[in-house]
Image: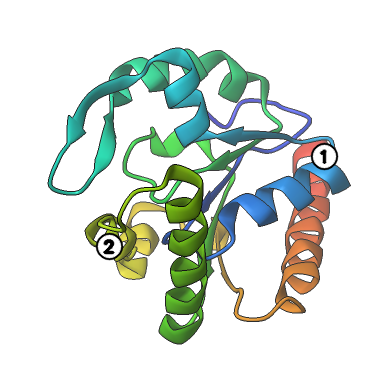
Amino acid sequence: MNTRRSLPNILICGPPGVGKSTLANLLEEDTELNWIDVNKVAIDTGCISEYDEELQCSILDGNTLVKLMEDLIREGGQIVDYHSANLFPLSWFDAVVILKANNATLDNRLHKRRKIERKAKNKPDNNVGAENFVIVIPEIEDLFDPDIVLELTNNVPEDMPINIDKILEWMKEWKEDNMQK
C-alpha cells in the first residue's frame, strides 16, 4: 500500500499493560497523526463476532473491522494501536513499533489495572489468561522488513519521552525519503 502519502501509518503493538495507548495518545498530541484504538473501534462499530467465556474477552470480527479501516489507512497518517500485527494487511504500515517492558513491570501494571477494573465493575478478577498474552517478537520481525520495525522499551516513565523522540526521528527520515520520490 505504500502509495504516496504525506504522513505514514504506524502500528504500535505489544502485550497488555506495556503502554501502547499512552504512546499512541502522546504521539497523536505531538504530530498530525490520528490514533486508532482498534479495540475501541471494534466495540463502537459492533465488530465483535463472539465472546470467549474462558478468556473473558470479546473476539473481534477482523474482516469487517479491516474493511472499516481501509479508507483511513489509505489516507495515511494513522497510528494503529493493537496488540499484534496479524489482523491487518502488512502493506498498511510504514513502521511497526514493538513496545516492550520487563515481566515485573508488566505484572505490576496489570495488577494495578485489574484492581481498578474490579472496583469499577465490582466483579472478580478472572481475565488473567488474556492478560498474559505475549507478542512473539521474532514473528513480527519475520512479517515486516527490519528497516520498518522499531523495538522500544517502556519500563519506567522516563522511557516514554525517549520513545516519542525515536518515533519522531523516524518520521522525519520517512518524510525526507518519501518527499524526494
Q: Is residue 153 visible?
A: yes
- The figure's colour scheme reads rainbow
Q: SS for tag 1?
A: loop
Which residue is depicted at the point 80% across and 69% down? 161
Q: SS for tag 2?
A: helix
Residue, disc 2: 128
Q: What residue type is labelled 1?
A: Gln
User: Is the residue 124 above or below the residue 162 in the image?
Assistant: above
Q: Position of residue 2 (x, y in %)?
A: 57, 32
Residue 163 in the figure: left or right of residue 90: right
User: Is the residue 69 above or below the residue 10 in the image?
Assistant: above
Which quarter of the picture shows residue 63? top left
Residue 178 in the figure: left or right of residue 148: right
| Distance between the alpha carbons at the discs numbered 1 and 2 | 48 Å
User: Is the residue 88 above or below the residue 159 in the image?
Assistant: above
Q: Where is residue 87 in the image (x, y as percent from the top left)?
A: 33, 36
Q: Where is residue 50 in the image (x, y as percent from the top left)?
A: 20, 25
Which residue is depicted at the point 31% across and 43% down? 86
In the image, which is nearer the foreground, mark 1 or mark 2? 2
Which residue is depicted at the point 43% across and 61% down? 114
Location of the C terminus (image quadrant): top right
Q: Which residue lies furthest to the left in this view?
A: 54
Q: Residue 180 carries which label?
A: 1
Which residue is depicted at the point 38% across and 50% down? 84
Q: How crowded is mark 1: few (under 14 residues within 10 Å), some or many (20 or more)?
A: few
Q: What residue type is labelled 2?
A: Val
Residue 61 in the figure: left or right of residue 95: left
Q: Where is residue 41 in the image (x, y as percent from the top left)?
A: 51, 25
